[in-house]
């Protein structure tokens, strides 16, 4: 990995509640079956075509991306990429014939031969839907120059699953919602989202449960709605949810028993010998509110994001350069956390 | 096979749901399938009563639509054989079973049979938003032609200022 500053180390708009923004575009090449029906030679051809379209010849992006054949990556490397949402868990689970183009700051990843031939993904910290989409749009336009993506006037971009027809755009914001999670507000919002073509899920997408009060809101409908309207709808929904969370937080942080929870969370982070992922997720969630609302000092939200990435299971093993048991990881995690939070204090 | 629910009518619909990895298969008659669909028993993607409601994956949903009376396939057994896509060799049955379309060309080959499902998923709408370059270059060409006509008219009317403006626009489009 390069030493370049990663996208998640900066703080975007509204980062007290919004963790990150993600844009995904699904695209396909004419003349090839969709990946689930491709033979190994066809997969190789598509990987090479996409790679050359982005970083071949005199491309201006030549030095900005790394090309990796997924089959040549170790299981730990794949798991680590999935933990950071740079590839999907499904992509990681069957890497043969697939490839990844990863931008140096990890803000753009292009999966080749996942469910569709090309999946362009852009990540940004905080709520930056337009900016992230602009980047995805630029890369899409560049690739389209040579690849001429499969397109139909009536059904838009053609995709392996008809649910993605049209713009092929999935826009999402990852929100931290500890204050409204428990008070019934979130459930009420969720039931209303379907009517306006959006959905709320756990942090790893379809079928995943929420961990540490992290939720992902994304658009559901892709046909008959433009990219611009999709983004502005989602922006509006996100703003409403953020406002509710902020209001509920005000009440929460004035509460002495919640302040006690934050202080205790910091105490455990600073002095635990062993910590598993589940306990970390819960304490992290509490402490994130503490940092956002000024209940602790000597730590930033960007710093917290960095810590969050650093102590995920696969990342720990990747950094250590060896396989570790869960018990070894829990010990290593606690050791790292003690270091990270050494100069964080109660405010 | 008899319908699993009423155990009276012949089962004509096959519905597969995947709820948090737990797969259920149903063989139902048309009316029981419709009834269960209405009651939300399949954890329909169309109404999010609760964020924790069971959800089908996109492919399972498409498969259930294509294979059930809602998509029209289950009631038209004559469609099970015949035509194959000239690019990938898929027939409609394999698309309906997997919920996955074979290749971009399948959308053209099986257009009329896929259309009801596309409408079910997205509503009766057509694409709006970004277009691929292939079509963009076509529209660019027609735009150029239109500008050329305007240019000829401007020259004829001796409106050289407008003509120069139009000429620059055409140059930019043709570049």
Image: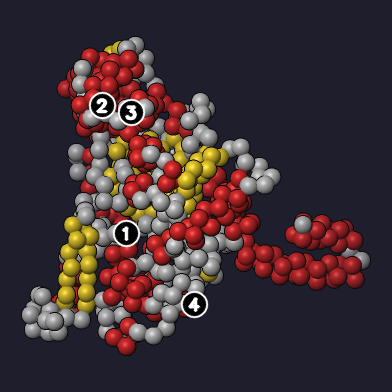
- Say if B107 sits above or below B54 in the image: below
The quadrant where residue A114 appears: bottom left
The span from disc 2 to disc 3 (Cα, nearest Å) is 11 Å
Q: Are marks 2 and 1 on the same chain?
A: yes
**The C terminus of chain A appears in which quarter of the rendering?**
top left
B48 with respect to A318 (left or right): left
Residue that badge 4 annotates: B86
Residue that badge 2 annotates: A329
Residues under numbered marks 3 and 1 in contact, where contact means CB atoms less than 8 Å apart: no
Residue at image location 44% in from the left, 75% down from the top: B89
Q: Position of residue A169 (x, y in %)?
A: 46, 55
Residue at image location 67% in from the left, 64% down from the top: B137
- Of A226 and A40, the residue lying toward us: A40
Residues under numbered marks 4 and 2 in contact, where contact means CB atoms less than 8 Å apart: no
Q: Chain of mark 2?
A: A
Q: How many marks?
A: 4
Q: Are marks 4 and 1 on the same chain?
A: no
Q: Which of the two labelled residues, at mark 2 and mark 3, occupies the earlier sequence position?
A: 3
Residue at image location 32% in from the left, 68% down from the top: B98
Q: Residues within 10 Å of mark 4 (few under 14, many from 20)?
A: few
Q: Chain of mark 4?
A: B
Judge depth for marks 4 and 1 and give the one in front: 4
Residues under numbered marks 2 and 1 in contact, where contact means CB atoms less than 8 Å apart: no
- Say if A128 sits above or below A155 in the image: above
Q: Which of the two labelled residues, at mark 2 and mark 1, occupies the earlier sequence position?
A: 1
Q: Position of residue A284 (x, y in %)?
A: 27, 27
Question: Residue A195: which disc?
Answer: 1
The span from disc 4 to disc 3 (Cα, nearest Å) is 49 Å
Q: Chain of mark 1?
A: A
- Say if A172 sits above or below B152 in the image: above
């Amino acid at each position: 990995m390069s030493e370049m500053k990663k996208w998640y180390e900066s703080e975007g708009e509204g980062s007290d509640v919004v963790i990150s923004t993600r844009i995904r575009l699904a695209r396909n090449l004419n003349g090839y079956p969709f990946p689930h029906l491709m033979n190994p030679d066809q997969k190789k051809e598509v990987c090479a075509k996409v790679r050359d379209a982005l970083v071949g010849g005199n491309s201006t992006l030549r030095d900005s991306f790394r090309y990796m054949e997924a089959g040549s990556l170790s299981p730990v490397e794949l798991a680590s990429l999935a933990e950071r949402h740079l590839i999907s868990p499904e992509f990681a689970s069957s890497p043969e014939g697939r490839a990844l183009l990863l931008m140096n700051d990890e803000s753009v990843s292009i999966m080749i031969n996942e469910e569709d031939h090309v999946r362009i993904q852009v990540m940004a910290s905080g709520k930056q839907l337009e900016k992230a989409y602009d980047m995805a749009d630029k890369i899409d336009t560049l690739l389209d120059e040579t690849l001429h993506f499969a397109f139909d006037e009536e059904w838009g971009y053609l995709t392996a699953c008809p649910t993605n027809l049209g713009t092929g755009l999935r826009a999402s914001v990852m929100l931290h919602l500890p204050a409204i999670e428990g008070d019934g507000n979130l459930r009420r919002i969720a039931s209303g989202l379907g009517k306006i073509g959006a959905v709320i899920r756990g942090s790893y997408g379809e079928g995943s449960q929420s961990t540490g009060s992290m939720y992902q809101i994304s658009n559901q409908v892709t046909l008959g709605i433009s990219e611009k309207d999709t983004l502005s709808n989602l922006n509006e929904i996100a703003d409403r949810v953020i406002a509710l969370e902020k209001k509920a937080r005000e009440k929460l942080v004035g509460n002495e028993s919640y302040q006690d929870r934050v202080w205790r969370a910091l105490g455990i982070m600073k002095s635990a010998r062993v910590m598993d992922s589940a306990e970390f997720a819960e304490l992290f969630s509490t402490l994130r509110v503490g940092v956002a609302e000024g209940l602790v000092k000597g730590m930033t939200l960007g710093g917290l994001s960095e810590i969050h990435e650093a102590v995920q299971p696969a990342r720990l093993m990747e950094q250590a350069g060896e396989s570790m048991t869960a018990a070894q990881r829990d010990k290593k995690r606690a050791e790292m956390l003690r270091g990270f939070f050494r100069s964080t204090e109660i405010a | 096979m008899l319908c699993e629910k009423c155990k009276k009518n012949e089962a004509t619909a096959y519905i597969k749901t995947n709820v948090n990895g737990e797969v259920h298969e149903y063989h139902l008659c048309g009316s029981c399938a419709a009834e269960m669909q209405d009651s939300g028993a399949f954890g329909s993607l169309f109404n999010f009563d609760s964020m924790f409601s069971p959800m089908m994956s996109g492919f399972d949903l498409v498969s259930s639509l294509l294979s059930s009376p809602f998509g029209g396939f289950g009631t038209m057994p004559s469609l099970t054989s015949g035509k194959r896509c000239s690019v990938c060799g898929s027939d409609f049955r394999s698309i309906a079973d997997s919920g996955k379309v074979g290749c971009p060309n399948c959308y053209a080959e099986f257009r009329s049979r896929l259309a009801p499902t596309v409408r079910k998923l997205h509503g009766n709408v057509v694409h709006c938003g970004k277009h691929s370059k292939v079509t963009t270059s076509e529209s660019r060409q027609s735009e150029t032609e239109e500008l050329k006509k305007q240019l000829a008219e401007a020259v004829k009317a001796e409106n050289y200022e407008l003509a120069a403006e139009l000429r620059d626009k055409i140059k930019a489009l043709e570049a």
